[in-house]
Image (tube, helix red, strand yellow):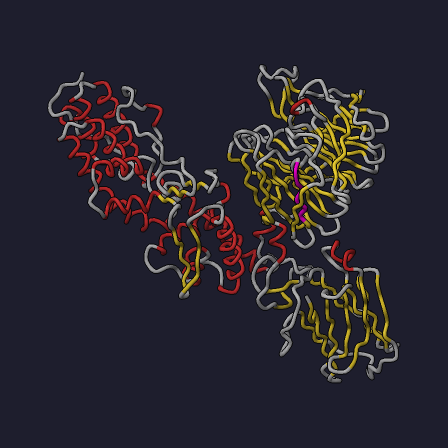
Amino acid sequence: MRGNVLRIKNEKQNLIYTLSFNSEEQDVIFKLNEEGKQNLVTLHLNKEEFNRRRWQQVQILFNLVKNDVTLKVNKERSTCPDLNFAEQSWKPVMYFGRSEYIIDIPSFGIRNLSVKDDKTTFLFPLNENKGNEVHDLEGSRIGEVVCPVWMINDAYFWRHKVTFESNEVAGAMFNVHNQEIYYFNDKQITTYNTTNGTSNTKEYAAPCPMKFRLGTSFVDTGQERLYAYEVYDPPFSGYASAWYDWHNNQWTPLSYDVLPTQLHHHSAFYDETNHRYIIFGGFGNHRFSNRFYAMDVVTGKWSEIKYTGDHIDPRYFTSMGYEPSSNSLYIFGGMGNESGDQAIERRYYYDLYKLDLNTNHLKKMWEIKWNQANMVPVRNMILPGDSTFYTLFYPEHYSQSYLCLYRFSISDGSYQVYGDSIPMRSDKIATNANLYYNANRNELYAVTLEFDNQDQASVSNIYSLSFPPITKEQMEVDDTSSLFFWIMLVGVIVIAALLAVVSIYIFIKRKNRSENQIDNEEPELPEGEGEIVDNLHNRPNSIYLFGNFSVRDRHNREINYLFSPKLKQAFILIFEYSLSEGITSQELSEQLWPDKTENKVKNIRGVTLNHLRKTLAELDGISLVYEKNVFRLILQEPCYCDYLQCMEILTGNPVEEQYERLCEIVSQGAFLKSLDIPLFDHFKALVEAQLEPTLSRQAEVWYEEEKYTKAIAMANASFNLDPLNEKSLRIIIGAYCKQGLYKEAKTRYKLFAKQYQMLQGENYSVTLQSLSGGVVLN
């Protein structure tokens, strides 16, 4: 990679200075040149050291008094003397990237740009996330950038880097010294270089002498070794620990020593100074643990660390981190109970303890109230040295789970959520995730390790996030510096308050598109009567638009959480337009961001579309394309969409089995039920207008054919389109009466009448006897 990074023009003297970069040689080379005339300064930097740093500090110092110029990159610097600047003041014009005829430029990023003389300093943080405007530290607009790619997005959106798979139990570990991530089993190891994104797989000189059950491991950077261990019951009663030397590609057995019980999901830290590996907590043999153990990496022997001070309840799923300044371990959160007995109801902990490794004294720092869904942390945490710690949280009780990055205050437990989420399948006991920090490159890495149903084959996904990360609020912040913004904000709040009152009224009147609120009085039907078996939502590569919006990926994992409200709207809007010719960029912007100008919406539209492509990449058979100036979604096998199947049935010549399928689809709920916004009202109305006659007609056909169970199911499905459909009510009441199910008929009538009164504001006047065909129901 080579080319010009910067051009500085002194237009008065017709001088141009350029800063060029070349990484194609043995070293990394920076050159400061007087364009078209001479090289002024050349700096050679060690390529390996240079690549370890994500950001390089570059300074160009023009001394107009001494007539020299200095180039400084990180710690290297050089000066070119005896220049003739002629004047002691000039107004430079600077161009980063492409300039005039200069198109040969390397890929680079800029942040914290500073331009100053002895009197004035201009600071450009360049931390915008959208648009073409550049602001100073006070938020004032002072510049413009053409075709920007705002890198702050990398501090919010986790970027998937690579996926590794193994047919056998595998482990994953980060080596901060080499900036490499290892994914390994007992036969081979794959090394992923976080600096350049390359990976290399090689088989060992000889197989690992121990068999992996869980793939637990740690790295000793001092001895340049990778350790694998099992705390209990190693397969085939073989070695319980071994270490790998990546220089000679060989494993060496360490010990047979194990602990008295298995300790799933223990937290851990490697004490490199004392050559011991410390673990806490875990679960095994139907019990939770609150003990600390240490393994001597010289002998491979385990011993318990006895501690004094505060009591900590037995638990697993804890997070651990090390603070060098006090030589202490922090232990956070987890799940367990006071007795340690699994048979007793478990509880989730949101507390922090500090273990002083000098005295083995344990102190409880705090415990906070948790008003969100229960979650557990991953086994390690990051302490950046600012009295906070970061860890990944996830609801482990969901099979299709997700990881979220949290930052906690060490002093009081206050916290914030950073970045978007990471999908993870968490239903296997061996599944785990870890969080790592690369200080040289200012990046966080999340490494997930998921196992199959036999706890053998594993998949590891690696994600990166720029550090420090940002919150959703920081990501969505717009220009808030001007008085105009605050005037508009107050106006929006006032208008929103008025709209809220109106919306409540409209919501009540439009309740026919809301979920039935009186399900608690649902009739008790005979087994299987009118029942729709939900076997739709159990296939990979599928999209469901009836009922609750749902998407399942190629592994049949539900990934609804990846669709933010705005991303979901973008997807449905493009989907709707794809049914005809597609949607233009302008139409997409006007529909989703009507209050923003094209300049402002350009970047946020690009981010949204990129995020949508990233999410849809989790499925096979669907793609977002841009051709002929429009965006379109293309769906093909094996991707399934319930709406498309529904339309296929309606436009064909359906047989009875297809009508049953149609009934099954609509029984899931109203079309786009979870998107009750005006933007999709026309789409909903169009679908309902196509469906309602077919459902009513087929319900009548089945009623006349005395297929009462199917008739009731189809009529019930039609209530998802029109909850006050009297025709469907007559079919249901009549079908129940034909079967002698008078109690069910009365209950269904009562439910309908109650909902009618709620939505219409008046009592339902049609009697049950008239609906039942004259049958008297007491």
Q: Which residues are magenta?
A: 187-192
Q: Quadrant of the N terminus?
A: bottom right
Q: Main secondary structure of the magenta part?
A: strand
How many marks on residues? 0
Q: Is residue 666 left or right of residue 425?
A: left
Decide which of 167, 664 is in the foreground and name it: 167
The residue under the point 48% across, 51% down is: 612
Residue furthest left as drawn: 774
Q: Is residue 372 visible?
A: no
Q: Is residue 440 left or right of residue 82?
A: left
Q: Which image quadrant for residue 40?
A: bottom right
Q: Which image quadrant for residue 268?
A: top right
The reply to whether the magenta stretch includes residue 191 is: yes
Decide which of 634, 413 is in the foreground and name it: 634
Q: Quadrant of the C terminus?
A: top left
- Above/below status of 487 relative to 536: below
- Above/below status of 396 relative to 480: above
Decide which of 54, 524 is in the foreground and name it: 54
Image coordinates of residue 765 in percent, x first then y, are 18, 30
The residue under the point 42% across, 47% down is: 499
Image coordinates of residue 575 in percent, x first then y, are 38, 52
Image coordinates of residue 124 in percent, x first then y, are 69, 63
The reply to whether the magenta stretch includes residue 65 is: no
Q: Which image quadrant for residue 666?
A: top left
